[in-house]
Amino acid sequence: MLPAPPVSETLIVAEVVEPEVTIVSQHPDSIVGEYHVDFAAMDTNDDGVIDAAEASSNPTLTAEFKAVDTDRDGKLSKAELKGWTR
């Protein structure tokens, strides 16, 4: 019988680096801040409303779309955007 090979142990020490995290707290679907949109410029198909695709050109309006769409029809009317339009 052959002798067993010598046992070697390797200890690996790793430092865990946590990523930096920024936490922002705000109510979901809440209109925060002062924003303005150019309704005529955003209504690219001239149907008198701004849909989600048209709103996508404005990141802030996209983020607030559900809060602004008070009748939940998936479109923003001039009345819903009162205070946002210039």
Image: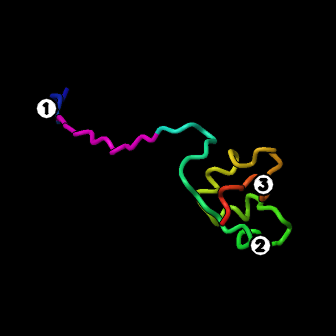
* Residue at position x 71%, y 73% in the image: 41
Write down the residue under mark 3: 79
Write down the residue under mark 2: 44
Observer-nearest residue: 7 or 46?
46
Q: CA distance from mark 1 to mark 2?
A: 76 Å
| Secondary structure beneath label 2 | loop
* Residue at position x 81%, y 62% in the image: 49
Among numbered discs 2 and 3, the one appearing first in the sequence: 2
Among numbered discs 1 and 2, the one appearing first in the sequence: 1
Q: Which residues are magenta?
A: 11-24
* Residue at position x 81%, y 44% in the image: 71
Observer-nearest residue: 84 or 60?
84
Q: CA distance from mark 2 to mark 3?
A: 18 Å
- Which of the two marks, 3 or 1, is nearer to us in this view? 3
Write down the residue under mark 1: 6
Left or right of 83 in this view: 22: left
